[in-house]
Amino acid sequence: PLAPFAKSCDTVYGLAINTVNPHFTNKNSATEEKEESCIQLDLTQFHPSAVMEFLSIITTTYATTNTNATLSTIIEKVVSDEQIVECCRIAHFLQCNYLVQELATIMESSIDSTNCLSICHFADQLNLHSLFEKS
């Protein structure tokens, strides 16, 4: 079940690899090893619907074998306009760089006079140069 997330997000991959390979950790007993083999990642700081939409992006992208379905098409089908910024924050938090860039590209196309300052601030927080410059 972790395959799509480990493949897409560096943070999840790092957690998974350290849990799977016991030589990376110092275990004293079999009980400790069993307790620590479960990966826990706290996403409670993000809006629950944004987390669900982010997970849908990852699982849909992983499950899609149709080459005509681009990432931007998947995002447009799965992510609501209200949650695109929050999904980008989640992708940034999990170090899912290709998804951060794709979400930023979609946001670039929606910049207008009503949201340019907030997008500029957001881009500055996440160090997204292209989005910052276009906002």
Image (cartoon, rainbow, N blue to C red):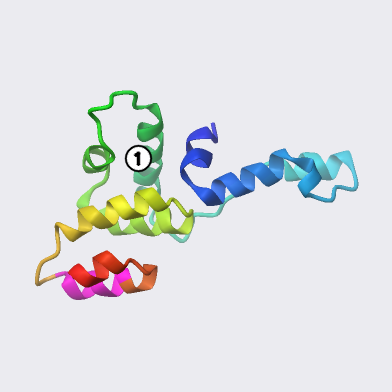
Q: Main secondary structure of the magenta part?
A: helix
Q: Amino acid at mark 1?
A: Ile
In the displayed orientation, state which residue is furthest to the left.
113
In the displayed orientation, state which residue is furthest to the right.
28
Q: Nearer the viewer, residue 113 or 42?
A: 113
In this rendering, the answer to whether 120 lies above or below 58 is below
Which residues are the magenta region? 115-123
Residue that appears at 84% across and 51% down = 26
In this rendering, the answer to whether 100 lies above or below 29 is below
Task: Give SS at disc 1.
Answer: helix
Crowd band around label 1 with a 10 angstrom C-alpha radius: few (<14), some (14–19), many (20+): many
In this rendering, the answer to whether 95 lies above or below 56 is below
Residue that appears at 38% across and 67% down = 126
Residue that appears at 74% across and 40% down = 21
User: Which quadrant holds residue 115?
Assistant: bottom left
Per the image, is 16 magenta?
Answer: no
Q: Which residue is mark 1?
A: 57
Place of residue 59 in the rendered image (x, y in percent of width and height, measured from the top left): 40, 34
In this rendering, the answer to whether 64 lies above or below 32 is above
The C terminus, quarter of image: bottom left
Place of residue 84 in the rendered image (x, y in percent of width and height, measured from the top left): 27, 54
User: Which quadrant holds residue 55?
Assistant: top left
Q: Nearer the viewer, residue 70 or 116?
A: 70
From the viewer's perspective, is 95 left or right of 123? right
Q: Is residue 22 at least partly visible in the picture? A: yes
From the viewer's perspective, is 27 left or right of 111? right
Q: How many marks?
A: 1
Residue that appears at 37% across and 69% down = 127
The N terminus, quarter of image: top right
Q: Nearer the viewer, residue 69 or 85?
A: 69
Q: Is residue 48 at least partly visible in the picture? A: no
